[in-house]
Image (tube, helix red, strand yellow):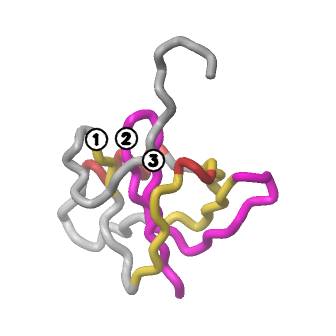
Amino acid sequence: MRIFRVSFHSNGKVYQLHAQQISQADLYGFIEISDLLFDEHTSLVIDPAEEKLKAEFAGVQRLLLPMHAVMRIEEVEKRGQNKILEMDGTLGNVTPFPLPPTDGRNR
């Protein structure tokens, strides 16, 4: 089984999700992500961040992300922890795509 870790930004946050399927969507400019992977609780320890993501994406069969929102796609050996990170400069080596200036003038 192939496992992919996808990092993308949405609403000022960086999401890191794990999935089994990633492809170019039929809709031009979008990446399709399906078969999201979440922890199957085999222990007594439950991660609240993982539960929040699981609830947010409950019932989602496939996720269509705009290509410019995707920061990184990696094929990994095993599933890691799904995360939501704040975009406050503490992201380590992940740099978000620069956004255009918002000074109110049309360019």
Residue in front for this viewpoint, 46 or 78: 78
Q: Residues within 10 Å of mark 1 (few under 14, many from 20)?
A: few
Circle nearer the viewer, 3 or 2: 3
Q: Residue furthest front?
A: 107
Asked whether the beta carbons under mark 1 and mark 2 sit within 8 Å of each other, the answer is yes
- Label number found at residue 13: 2
Q: Residue furthest top?
A: 104
Image-quadrant location for residue 22: bottom right
Q: What is the magenta range? A: 1-29
Q: Is residue 69 magenta?
A: no
Residue 52, given in percent of the width and then of the height, sits at: 36, 45
Residue 6, given in percent of the width and then of the height, sits at: 47, 63
Disc 3 target residue: 97
Image-quadrant location for residue 38: bottom left
Residue at (41, 81) in percent of width and height: 76
Residue 2, given in percent of the width and then of the height, sits at: 52, 84
Q: Amino acid at mark 1?
A: Glu
Specify which label sits upstream in the sequence, 1 or 3: 1
Residue at (52, 64) in percent of width and height: 36
Rounded to the nearest angstrom, the CA distance separating label 1 from label 2 is: 5 Å
Q: Amino acid at mark 2?
A: Lys
Dot 3 falls on a residue whose secondary structure is: loop
Quadrant (top left, top right, bottom left, bottom right) of the C terminus:
top right
Residue at (58, 67) in percent of width and height: 35
- Label number found at residue 86: 1
Rounded to the nearest angstrom, the CA distance separating label 1 from label 3 is: 15 Å
Residue at (81, 59) in percent of width and height: 26
